[in-house]
Image: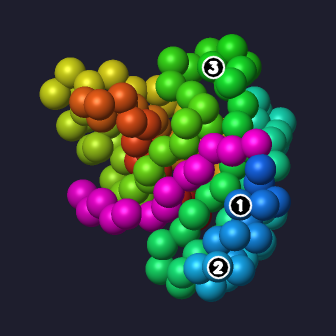
Amino acid sequence: MKLKLHHMNFATEKVGEMDEFYRGILDMESEAALGDGRIKEQGYGGDVAFVSDGDIQIHIAEKDMKIGFKTGQAVNPVDRGHIAFRTDDIASFKKRLEEKGIPYSNFGAWAMKGWEQIFFYDPDGNVVEVHQVHE
């Protein structure tokens, strides 16, 4: 099972301003085409901007405190934001969490078409995402 840092997610009420900041000040490039793969009907229809340095992405997402109520999941990935890793074997990663007694919220293909996503907390309460892309 391979894990690779994929993106950081910032939850904000200033999506446009944040997008402009990261593109204008830090020379990040817009990844607007990622927006075409969003699934908005399943609990999160908030505004999102995608930027990248060519390797790592930043997802700038509109804060939504009601995701847990809308999805029935314990972890809210757009309350404070999160860090995300991509894997090639999410089933093995879920098994690893279960063996170590770490609970996770299994969102499945919730926000992005073809992305199977889980979210859990690190020991300090930071949200961590692990996802696998299914073609």
- Is-magenta flag for residue 77? no
Left or right: residue 87 versus residue 2 is: right
CA distance separating discs 1 and 2: 10 Å
Quarter assignment of residue 95: top left
Quarter assignment of residue 87: bottom left
Instruction: State which mark lies toward you, 3 or 2.
Output: 2
Q: Give the residue at mark 3.
A: 68
Label 2 SS: loop
Q: Give the residue at mark 2.
A: 25
Quarter assignment of residue 99: top left
Label 3 SS: helix
In percent of the image, x 56 and y 52: which residue is there?
Answer: 9
Give the answer, above or below, for where 83 lies relative to 44: below
Mark 3 is on which residue type?
Gly
Give the answer, above or below, for where 15 lies relative to 58: above
Q: What span is colored magenta in the figure?
A: 1-13
In percent of the image, x 49 and y 30: which residue is there?
Answer: 106
Q: Quadrant of the C terminus?
A: bottom right
Label 1 or label 3, whichever comes before in sequence order: 1
Label 3 or label 2, whichever comes before in sequence order: 2
Label 1 SS: helix
Instruction: State which mark lies toward you, 1 or 3.
Output: 1
Residue 68 picture location, percent across and down: 63, 19
CA distance separating discs 1 and 3: 24 Å
Main secondary-structure element of the magenta-colored stretch: strand
The answer to whether any part of residue 126 appears in the image is: yes
Label 1 or label 2, whichever comes before in sequence order: 1
Q: Nearer the viewer, residue 110 or 19?
A: 19
CA distance separating discs 3 and 2: 34 Å
Q: Give the residue at mark 1.
A: 18
